[in-house]
Image: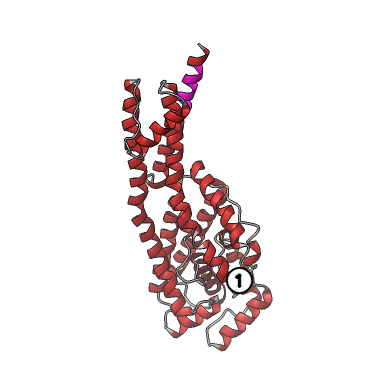
Amino acid sequence: MLDIGIKGLAFTVGAFLVAYTVLSAIRSFVLPRNESVLLNNWVFQGIRRVFNGMASLGKTYEQRDKVMALYAPVGLVALPIVWLGVVSLGYTMCYWALGEGDLERCYRISNSSLLTLGSEEPSKHGLANIMSYSEATLGLLLLTLLISYLPTIYQAFSRREQLVARLELRAGLKASAVDLLLWLQEADMLEKGSHWQHWEQWFVDIEETHTSLPILSFFRSPQPGRSWVSAADLMLDTAALLISTVNLPRDPHMVMSFKAGCVAINRVARFFENSAKTEAPKALSEYTPDSTPHHADFRAAYQKLTEAGLPLHPNETAAWAKYQELRTRYTHAITFLAKLTMAPETKPI
């Protein structure tokens, strides 16, 4: 009786592991919502600790960036391996509960079915044969699921990086909000909404893709000095400086872009802080210095914009207060994501 109870428990646990793994895969790549999957979190966080240790050995940002560029691809490849491993373990317990032999033979049956080798087959129970075929089906399903969604992941990555690259062409690799404002003035785009419409759509896309496929946040730009977090910071800073300081009619597209950016950045940050319970790595936080502008930085920016001939609000102190208030809407999320993704350092305004 005790033996039956133990085997019943083993079958139940094994079936639970299989069902949970399949559901995790569905929630990861099929469900169009920002679901946090515990199994995936364990995989990515475990691999991240290894990469943090290797990156901390680098003496320059370029060396650390080269190491961290592999983190997201390695994590993505490791995910189906872990899924298959858990499914194999679950079916091993089920075969053992059905009396197919000792654990070693059950493990061989499980992996033979999962990898469609056919070298070991159940022999004592009709239900075990059914489970063998179901395991082979699930193994193919899990691998196919990831492979079929790789194009989706890289399409979202490509859309994100196209606008980041265009921003670098316009304002420079390490541009500040003042640099971008001066470029917009030279290009006669300060009062035109086409530039901001592209960024509004970009922020909307970031919110959707980087919460439903959170591994995208860690895919690094092709060039070491670029980062989607730094680009978001630059655009939000530019919009905040434009709203608070430049005395021009308010462009509705710019305002909507700023709102979309604040919503997107905060939701992505909250996903990692709350849902995924991810902390910014302390070992790498020193590589992302605080870029919060001080009043002296703002005063220098105000003077530079004045010299460039931009119409500014006459009360510099009031403009500084408004700029500070606008920054509170996104600065915490930007700082958290910059440390989490090990983004390159940015300049104050």
Q: Which residues are magenta?
A: 5-13
Residue 204 lies in the magenta stretch: no
Front one among 274 and 153: 153
| Quadrant of the image occupied by residue 326 | bottom right
Q: Examine the rendering and report whether any part of residue 214 can be seen.
A: no
Dot 1, crowdedness within 10 Å: few (<14), some or many (≥20)?
few
Q: Residue at x 33, y 38 (%)?
A: 117
Q: What main secondary structure does the magenta stretch of the protein show?
A: helix
Query: As drawn, which residue projects farthest toward the top?
Result: 1
- The residue that disc 1 covers is 60
Label 1: element kind: loop
Front one among 72 and 101: 101
Front one among 340 and 90: 90
Residue 123 image point, x, y percent: 34, 23
Q: Examine the rendering and report whether any part of residue 180 can be seen.
A: yes
Residue 167 image point, x, y percent: 45, 74
Left or right: 191, with 113 as reference point: right
Under mark 1, the amino acid is Thr
Residue 251 image point, x, y percent: 44, 72
| Quadrant of the image occupied by residue 177 | bottom right
Q: Residue at x 56, y 83 (%)?
A: 305
Q: Residue at x 56, y 81 (%)?
A: 312
Residue 55 image point, x, y percent: 59, 62
Q: Residue at x 41, y 33 (%)?
A: 108
Across the whole image, how many numbered discs are drawn on residues?
Answer: 1
Relative to residue 248, is residue 260 depicted above or below? above
| Quadrant of the image occupied by residue 206 | bottom left
Front one among 192 and 209: 209
